[in-house]
Amino acid sequence: MCQVEEDYKDEALQRTAALSVGQKCMKCKEGCAVVVIRVGDAFCKSCFRDYFVHKFRAMLGKTRLIFPGEKVLLALSGGSTSSSMLCQVQEGLSREASKKLRFSPGIVHIDEGAVCGRSAEERQETLMQLEAIFQASGFPYHIVYLEEVFKLPNSILQSVSSSPTSHGQNYKEAVDDFLQKQREALIDVEQRLTVEDERNVTHSEQIEAKFDQLSTSTAVSEENSATILSETSPSGKWPFTLEQTEAVKELFSSVKTLTAKEELLQTLRHHLILHTARNKEYSKIMMGDSCTRLAVKLLTNISLGRGASLAVDTGFSDNRYGDIMILRPMREYSSKEIAFYNKLFEVPTVFTPALDTKASDKASIHRLTESFVNKLQTDFPSTVSTVYRTSEKLNTACSDINSGVEQTDKCLLCLCIMDTKVEEASAFQATLISEKLSCKQSPDQMPVNKVSEQSCCDNQAEEKGKCCSTNSGACHPPVSNTTTDFLTLLCYSCRLTVKDMVSLSLLPQYVLSEAERRKRRAQVREQIQEFLLPPEDESDENY
Amino acid sequence: LNTVYGLHLGYFTGGAELLFNGTKEQHVKLPSQSEQWDVRQLLVWIKTNLLKERPELFIQGDTVRPGILVLINEADWELMGQLDYKLEDRDNIVFISTLHGG
C-alpha cells in the first residue's frame, strides 16, 4: 500500500513539475533518463533497450502463432518501424539457445518508386542502400517491383481455403515436417553434415545459422532467375519493362484522389507480398505497423468505410488470405519509441519518398487522420494508446468461418469478407438506390432490368429463361454496366476506391480476368438456381 | 553574454531532411545576441534561414509539427524543457519525423 501511494505521489510530482534535466531513470533509478515514453515514464538508455527488446519477444511469446522453424517473411519498406522489426528479429535469433527465436526469416521489399515519382537512378540508389542492410542481416531477401503486378496470376485473388495448409495440423507434425525439410536442404548445401549431427539440438541451431548465411547467397541468385518473368528488361537488371513502368504510372495517374491512390497502392502491395510469400513458401508475413500507425489506420479505415474489416486490418493477426497469415508484431510500440530506439542504437533505415511525401495535411484521408491523431497526441498523450486499445478489442465474429466462406463472398481487391450483403433496409442499400436514381449517364434499363428480373423470377420458372437471357445480353455491351458488374465484386470501401478511377481497363490483367471469371461463375450459378429445384451441383453441367 | 553558438543540427530520418534540401546534418553558427538562445528562438531562426520549402510541414505555430521528435544531445527534449531549453555551445539537436512519408 505504502508503495502505491509513493508511486502515485511521484507521478503527480512529475506531472506538475516539468521533467528536469538529469532526471533519473524510473526503472533502475540510476542511469540518466534519455527518453520519456508515457507521461512521467523516463527511461535511461539501457533500461529502454531492455524494455524494447522484451516487448517484442513478449508479443510473439504470448500470441503463440509462430511455429518453431516456420518460414516468416518480413515485409520491409526500409522505414523506421520495419527496420526496427528486422533489428528485433536479428536480436532474437542471436540469443543463446534457450531464449532464441526459432523461426527462419526472409525479407521482402516492394519497390514503389515508379508511382512515387522517382527516376530509375534514384530507385537504384535506394535499393543499393536497402540491399546493404538486407545482406548484413544474413537473411534471404526478395526485392519485388510494383511493376510486377502485371505479371501476377489470377490465383492471388482466389482464396485458398479449399486446400488446408500444413499449419492447420498439429504442432508436432509441423515441427517434424520442418526438420525434415531442413535436413534435405542442408544435405544439399553442406554435404559434410550428417543427419545424426542435426538431431542434436544445439548443433542444429548452429547449422541453422550457417544455413541462413549460405542461403543468402543462393537466394540472391535464385531471386534473379525466379522472379524475372519478363524476357525483355531494358537496363538488363530490372525485371520489368519500361512499358510496365509507364502502365503502372498511368494506372495511378488515372486515380483521381490521393486517398484512392493510397488504397490502391496498399492493395497492390499486399498482393505482391502475398505472391512472394506463396512463391517462396513462407507461411507467415510480418508487417511493421506501429501502435501510432495502427491508431491512424483504425480511424482512417472507419472514414474510408472499411468498418467491417477493422479487426483484420488492424489486429495482431490477419488471416484473410487463408493460407498465409499476416502478423503485426510491432503493434505495441509507439512511433516515438521506435524513432528513439533507431536513433539511440543506430538501426539503419532508408528513407524512401512515399505517395504522400510533402503533401499537405488535407491531401488525403490518411494524411488528415494522421495529423489529427498527432495533434491530439501532443495535448493528450494517451490518445494513441486509447485508440489502439479499442482496436485490440475488435474481433470478427466470423473469422473462424473463414474457410467456409465462398470465394465470391470475398472482395476482389482487399480479399476481406464482403460487407455488402446486408438487408434491404440499410444505409448501404439506400446509398445504392439514390446513386442509381441520381446517375444521369447510366442507361435507364439497368435498374428497370433488375426490378423486372426480380419480380419475374419470383413468379414463374418459364418466364425466367427469357428475362434473364435478355438481361445478360443487355449486361455486356455498355461500358457503364461492366463497371457496375465489377463493383458488385467489391466491398464497400474498395468500391469507393474504384469509383475514383477513370477507367477500369488500366487495372492489371489478373484483377480483370479474375473479375470476369467470378462474373461468369455468378451467372452460371444464377442459371442453375433458376432451373433446378434441388441444389445439386453434379447435374448442373448438363444444362 | 555575447557567445556565438556552434550547433550541430541533424535531420536524421523519416523525411525531415527533404525540407532541408536533402541535407541530413549540418553545423550552424548562430548569430550572437544579448541573451542566451533557447530552442524557441532556434526554431524561428531555422525557419527563416534553413527551411527551403513548405515550412508548415516542419514548424507549426511556435513549435515543431506534431509527429516530429526533437532530441537534444541524444536525449528527449521533453526532459530538457522543450522550447525553453537554453542552448549551449556545441549542442547537438536532431529532428526526427515519425510521420508517414516524411
Image (cartoon, coloured by chain):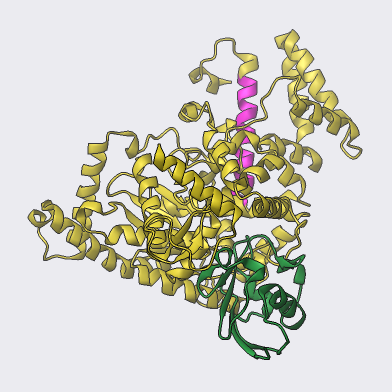
Chain colours: A yellow, B green
Q: Quadrant of residue B66?
A: bottom right
Image point 55% across, 52% down: which residue?
A13
Q: Is residue B59 visible?
A: yes
Residue at the location (81% across, 18% down)? A452
Against A156, is B1 above or below?
below
Secondary structure predominantly adopted by residues drawn in magenta: helix
Percent across and percent down for residue A152 are 53, 53
Name the residue located 21 percent from the left edge and 64 percent from the top edge. A189
Residue A94 falls inside the magenta stretch: no
Image quarter of residue A477: top right
A507 versus A435 height, above or below: below
Q: Which residues are magenta?
A: A509-528
Q: Position of residue B80 (x, y in %)?
A: 57, 68
Residue A530 sits above or below residue A30 on the image:
above
Residue lying furthest left: A196
Between A140 and A477, the one nearer to me in the picture: A140
Q: Is residue A518 magenta?
A: yes
**Residue A350: percent from the left, percent from the top?**
52, 71
Q: Residue B85 or A117: which is nearer the viewer? A: B85
User: Residue, x 71% and y 89% (percent of image)?
Assistant: B31
- In this rendering, position of residue A154 left or right of residue B43: left
Quarter where residue A53 is shown: bottom left
